[in-house]
Amino acid sequence: MKTIRAALAASCMLVMPGLAAAETELIFNSYLPPHDELYRIAIRDFAQDIERESGGSIKVTIPDSSLAPSDRQYEMVRDGIADMAIVSTGGVPQLVTLNKIGDLPLNSPSSRAASIALWETYNRYFLPFDEFKGVKVLSTNVLPGRQILSVGSLAVEHVGDLQGVKLWSPPGALTETVRQLGAVPVNSEFTDLQEYVTKGTVDGLAMAAGSASGARVLEYVTHYTRVPGGLGSLSFAVFISQERWAELTEDEQAAILRAAEGLPGRTGAEADAVEAGLAPEMERIPTTVLEGEALAEFERLLAGRIEEWKASAKAKGLENPDEVLAFYHEVLARETQQD
């Protein structure tokens, strides 16, 4: 497998002779499209920041196409094909339980606040568990909370309106959340979503406006149900191979850490900016903001997802999941005040 990495590095040397004089090259893989906010901030800009902080002694190469499927990023880095990557927490369910706190319902009032909350919680409580074995986590990110975007005649004002409806959701935690609310989860490749919407295969979507816009389905949304904090979210980690990290000099490690300083907040702020940019379009869509008893109905059902995380975390060895949740929410409250 490492021969693939060596061949890539050699080809980069041919097209970019300046790399030949570099002390260190890092291959930072990405499966994300260039327009994606995660790519722009957590990969492209982060790579540039590493080069700048190192004074040019580190060169970061981002391959033109992914060296592995999206769900194999962790294994790709562990096997030495690339040095760095970004992975969805849901993409490594066999390893990661604790960081799924960022995926829980009602826990992402903004991407910036949730990303910072997850990063601080990870470093304070989760780091000793070494769930991301073989890699060093440099940043975490949580997307804006997923909402209910109806298509067709569906309009969700109470949880009862979801009973039996077909709601598109990404695989993993959000699928279970949709099921717990009484809806029927429908999964598909993101690229197939427009077809599912236009052909009436689904009644609604569990996603944020930015994702719907990226999938080119926002124009088909007929009703928007906003759940404070979201139905749940998707969390990510940016990491470098632990073996490769150990090979770097102290100065090189320090440069990468300087570049990573504040990365969760910057990445989250960019995702929030994407949502804010769609506000005029969302304002034209009939909207229900859940509050009062209608919100309480959702909270009662969604509490089951939170209890499941607490049980899984405790089984993993976390003695105080309630304390950890309280800390996470304290950071959310602090950061939300600054949004």
Image: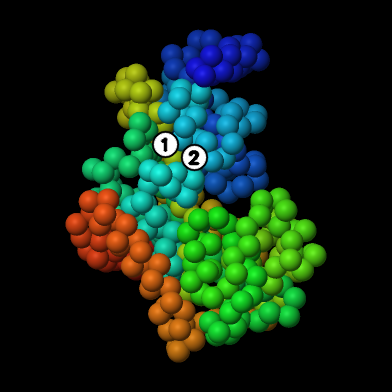
Find residue 86 and name its label. 2
Question: Residue 94 occupies which quadrant of the picture?
Answer: top left
- Of the 4 image quadrants, the one containing the C terminus is bottom left
Number of numbered labels in the structure image = 2
Label 2 close to label 1 by CB (< 8 Å): yes
The residue positioned farthest toward the right in the image shown: 199
User: In the image, is 15 to the left or to the right of 119?
Assistant: right
Residue annotated with mark 1: 239
Amino acid type of the residue tagged 1 in the rendering: Phe
The answer to whether any part of residue 153 appears in the image is yes
Residue at (25%, 61%) from the top-left corner?
Answer: 321
Find residue 149 and name its label. none
Residue at (44%, 17%) from the top-left corner?
Answer: 24
Q: Is residue 279 above or below residue 81?
A: below
Q: Position of residue 196 (x, y in %)?
A: 74, 61
The residue positioned farthest toward the bottom in the image shown: 293
User: In the image, is 106 to the left or to the right of 183?
Assistant: left
